[in-house]
Amino acid sequence: MSEQTSGNSGGGNGALAFIVGGLVVIVAVLAFFMWSGGMSSKKQVDVNISASAPKLPDAPAPKAPGG
């Protein structure tokens, strides 16, 4: 039978978990900036458009029937 030594088990798992956790945080921050527009302030735009309608010529006077 083989014997297992318990003196050095799981030493690399902590570093791997730290790296994977850091990558998850980076992806979450990038997703936040992509979907929410980041931390940019919203610009307020005030647009005033005024246009006057052209003056149309007067309609011709109606003609009397038959004539």
Image (cartoon, rainbow, N blue to C red):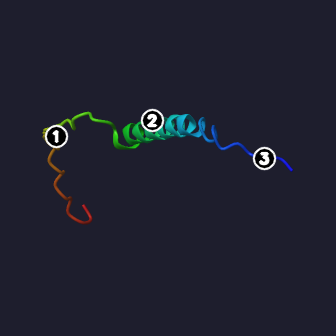
- The C terminus - image quarter: bottom left
Q: Secondary structure at mark 1?
A: loop
Count of numbered circles in the view? 3
Of callouts 3 and 2, which one flags the residue occurring earlier in the amino acid sequence? 3
Q: Between label 2 and label 1, give the one nearer the viewer.
A: 2
Q: Secondary structure at mark 2?
A: helix
Identify residue for label 3.
Answer: 3
Identify residue for label 2.
Answer: 26
Residue 2's x, y, as percent?
A: 83, 47
Q: CA distance from mark 2 to mark 1?
A: 59 Å
57 over 61 or under it: above or below: above
Residue at image point 32% right, 36% down: 38
Q: Between label 3 and label 1, give the one nearer the viewer.
A: 3
Q: Is residue 19 left or right of residue 50?
A: right
30 over 3 or under it: above or below: above
Q: Residues within 10 Å of mark 2 (few under 14, many from 20)?
A: few
**Which residue type does callout 3 highlight?**
Glu
Kindly indicate whether the residue at mark 2 contacts the one at mark 3 (C-beta within 8 angstroms). Answer: no
Q: Residues within 10 Å of mark 3 (few under 14, many from 20)?
A: few
Q: CA distance from mark 3 to mark 1?
A: 99 Å
**Which residue type does callout 2 highlight?**
Ile
